Amino acid sequence: MGDSITLKSRFDGFELSAYRAAPNDARRGGLVLVQEIFGVTDVIRGLCDGFAEDGYEVIAPAFFDRQAPGYESDYTRDSMMQGKALSEAAPWDQVQGDLQAAIDALSGPVFVTGFCWGGTAAWLAACRCEGVAAASGYYGRRISELVDETPKVPIILHYGKTDASIPLEKVDEVAARHPDVPIYLYDAGHGFVSDRSHDYDPDAARLARLRTLALFSRSGGGRGEV
């Protein structure tokens, strides 16, 4: 459904690839969709295609292109360790510049969503990037690193109650520092949106998606308005 494009980072001018999916019907807005640590996989491309069916023009940048061009992996433990290392080698200022390039490539209103590492990137975009209307972050473990930063636009966060990688104390810390940010807890583990994850939970994924689409609609994403 989608195609490949190139973005020029606002951080250092690096050219990174991205997957782009366009809506077939009236356009609601633009959406930057941020990958998990596994890269721009078929799971991520499928999520892009799904949001395109909902009326969004979606761009999913390949944030690891500097270290590993075209990186895609499976969900094995070895791949998890490799993806974790790649994500930790990407400083947040660099991620911000890459995000801004994707935002700038879309006409507004522009939204951001992300999963796992991308959930933290969605928080980063809401706090630092220009031209964002709203954001939705899924199980962003590293938001605690950026908890002192305040979102400039509406954002909602989604976490699994049984996520072993994100203790609920970390979620409570975000809630305490940002009481105005809606935080939703689901009876699920980490990665509950991905049907390739052993924690996949279709009911939680569906509810989180509905909440995300409702936020985007409230924040200017009305079909046919742009």
Image: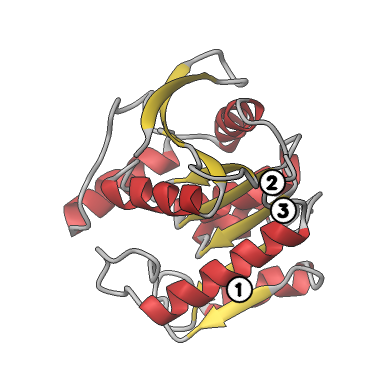
Q: Quadrant of residue 83?
A: top left
Residue furthest top as drawn:
13
Task: Return the residue nearer the eye: 101 or 65.
Answer: 101
Q: CA distance from mark 2 to mark 3?
A: 6 Å
Q: Which quadrant is the C terminus positioned in?
A: top right
Residue type of the residue flagged with mark 3:
Gly
Q: Residue 171, which numbered label?
A: 1
The amino acid at mark 1 is Val
Q: Residue at x 51, y 52 (%)?
A: 114
Decide if residue 129 is in sight here: yes
Give the quarter of the image for residue 200. Answer: bottom left
**For numbered disc 1, what is the local secondary structure?**
helix
Whether the residues at callouts 2 and 3 have beta carbons within 8 Å, the answer is yes
- Residue 21 in picture, x, y percent from top left: 44, 38
> What is the secondary structure assignment of the residue under circle 2?
loop
* Left or right, residue 149 beside residue 56: right
Q: Which residue is mark 3?
A: 222
First-in-chain label (1 vs 2):
1
Please report the residue visible at 29 percent of the width from the left and 45 percent of the height from the top: 41
- Tally of numbered discs: 3
Q: Nearer the viewer, mark 1 or mark 2?
A: 2
